[in-house]
Amino acid sequence: MSQAAAALQLRLTAQHALLRDSVAGPLLLLHNSGAAALLRRRNARISWSQSRTYERKRLFPQARRQRRRQHNAPHAPPPAAAAADRGPPATPLLAVANAELRALWRENQPVGDTQWSSRRRRSGSPQPLGGSRGGSDGGGSDGGGGSGGGGGGGGGGSDGGGGGGGGGGGRRGVTSFALRSASAVTLRFAHADADRAHRAHKAALRRFFLRIMSVMLAAAQGAALVAALVSDRGAEREGAALVGALVSDRGAEREPKRSPRTPPDRGAKRETASASASGEREQEAALVAAAVAAITKNLQLQEEAALIAAVMAALIAGEAALIVA
């Protein structure tokens, strides 16, 4: 029977070591690397300097509530009646694995955190590197292992019972270094995602303002085109008025100018006719020059309007390409 018990014990020890190496490490990394904090940090867009304070004060209220419950709970072992009410105990392998996970988690808690405050030290709670406090029945539990070897035994109870034996040496340095490295990697990935999102947001804002400026430029060009068309209409009306004046002047020139009461004076009539003809020619030349200037201005305005229309078409095509892209 003893050999079977020893074989069973060796088998359970091997299974426990396998479970610890395959499950405890990933579980601790998942717990301490801050996967939930990574997601919340990515959504909250907080900076590097605010990350630790934000994580400690706002992201994990359930952890603070759990620590408060642990602080307020009595540290003595439960009575036998309560243990009997809980039903049959768990399987030995799972119980050992749970105890090992709890010990590893306690061992890797940072010293100086709010969990190990002076109030808890005054109340006699377990210290991170020392032995735990003895229970009310006098049996002290094993001391927590530190980085340099086993811790001391627990204190004796009120009835003089001896303390428990010292715990084995811990792996605090290696494990905490791995956890800190994993946390740094996750933080680096989180800040890379935040920087990438910030650059994408800046590019979207730049495209938005470029579209607004192109629309404003197109509106200004449209207003200039309308003004050019209106001035073009005015130049056309001015040219038509000049041509009408020229035609009416020709008609007045063709009408006979006679005065029935004055006797006809051939020499004076020739001089008057020559003077009026020279004045009319000067007036006609001025009218023709004004009409030519108006027509030239009209042609220039038409060319400018065509150029503005081409520029607006190019702007609208570029804006459509930007919107499609």
Image: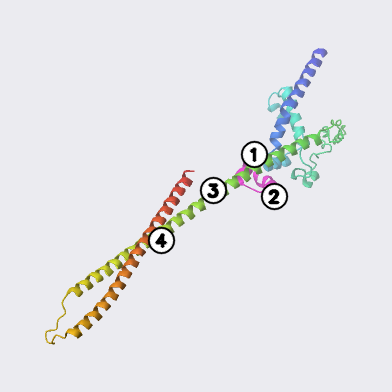
Mark 3 and mark 4 lie on one chain; the one further toward the N terminus is: 3
- Viewer-nearest residue: 81 or 18: 18
Question: Within the magenta stretch, is there residue 49?
Answer: yes
The residue indicated by pointer 1 is 36
Q: Answer few, some or many: residues within 10 Å of disc 3's Cα (few below 14, many 20 plus, some between 14 and 19).
A: few
Snapshot quadrant of residue 78: top right
Q: CA distance from mark 3 to mark 2?
A: 27 Å
Residue 253 shown left or right of residue 82 in the figure: left
Q: Nearer the viewer, mark 4 or mark 2?
A: 4
Q: Nearer the viewer, mark 1 or mark 4?
A: 4
The residue indicated by pointer 2 is 49
* Stretch in magenta: 37-62
Amino acid at circle 4:
Ala
Q: Secondary structure at mark 4?
A: helix
Residue 204 is tagged as 3
Mark 1 and mark 4 lie on one chain; the one further toward the N terminus is: 1
- Viewer-nearest residue: 2 or 85: 2
Question: Within the magenta stretch, is there residue 304?
Answer: no
Extreme-left residue of the structure: 260
Question: In the image, what residue occupies the spot 38% across and 58% down?
Answer: 303
The residue indicated by pointer 4 is 224
Q: Nearer the viewer, mark 3 or mark 4?
A: 4
Amino acid at circle 3:
Ala
Q: Nearer the viewer, mark 3 or mark 1?
A: 3
Q: CA distance from mark 3 to mark 4?
A: 30 Å
